[in-house]
Amino acid sequence: MPLPRFDRLPADARAAILAVARAHFARDGKDAASFNQIIAEAGISKSSAYHYFDGKDDLFGAVVADAAARTLTALGPWTEVATADELWEQVVAGTTRLVAHLREHPDDRAVLAGLPRSDSGSWVQSLVANGLKIGLIAPHPSAELVTVATTGIFDALDTWALDRPHELDSSVADTLVLFLARLWQATPRGETAPA
């Protein structure tokens, strides 16, 4: 992660450096991107760059953290709901915002593709807790296991979608709802439970 001096830069200066680095890492990949080219294009000297970062890996970590934060901001916080339909609507709305962000910010998508997922953990935990509270999700065999399995579905779909930018559309939300409904043995939004 960046050194303390980077955090003391004005927000617009930090954002400008990260934007240049994000573009390079998205275009060239972490290994092929040149630290020297990034800092030259960002308009900072090599000595300044080493006051902000320990090197290219540290800069890449800062870019990934920034892209993840921007993506989570697009997802938005989980807001507790009272009904199953409201829960499904919120899952679809969050997924739709996330897909739109990744389509509009391909550099974020490119930087995050291929990395392990785990940043959506609190959102997923809140979703599962809410689903348990309203009775959409059965707590058996274990609420903790349901949370882990739900996180696995999110991680798998994230990985799949990030690797296929041409398939980032509304079907991602529909697929997520289908997988979650199957895992939770729940009725998806707009459908009625079998008699």
Image: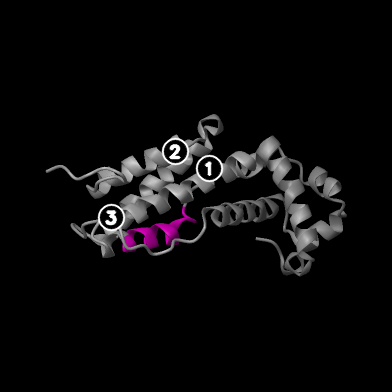
Mark 1 surroundings: few (<14), some (14-19) or many (≥20) residues within 10 A = many
Residue 49 is left or right of residue 136, and the answer is right
Q: Earlier in the sequence, mark 2 or mark 3?
A: 3
Q: Along the line of sight, which residue is nearer the eye, 45 or 184? A: 184
The residue that mark 1 highlights is 99
Mark 3 surroundings: few (<14), some (14-19) or many (≥20) residues within 10 A = many
Q: Along the line of sight, which residue is nearer the eye, 76 or 17? A: 76
Q: Is residue 4 visible?
A: yes
Where residue 180 sits: x, y (%)?
A: 32, 46
Residue drawn at x 38%, y 62% as measured from the top left = 126
Q: Is residue 165 above or below residue 148?
A: above
Residue drawn at x 70%, y 46% as measured from the top left = 22
Q: Is residue 175 above or below residue 21?
A: above
Where residue 6 sits: x, y (%)?
A: 75, 64
Q: Mark 1 near mark 2, Cβ–Cβ under 8 Å?
A: yes
Q: Earlier in the sequence, mark 1 or mark 3?
A: 1
The residue that mark 3 highlights is 146
Residue 62 is left or right of residue 175, and the answer is right
Q: Quadrant of the C terminus?
A: top left
Where residue 46 sits: x, y (%)?
A: 85, 54
Instruction: Measure the alpha-carbon separation of dots 1 and 2.
Output: 8 Å
Image mark for residue 172: 2
Residue 13 quadrant: bottom right
**Mark 1 residue element:** helix
Q: Quadrant of the N terminus?
A: bottom right
Q: Along the line of sight, which residue is nearer the eye, 118 or 77? A: 77
Where residue 153 sits: x, y (%)?
A: 37, 45
Q: Which residues are magenta?
A: 118-130
**Mark 3 residue element:** helix
The amino acid marked with disc number 1 is: Val
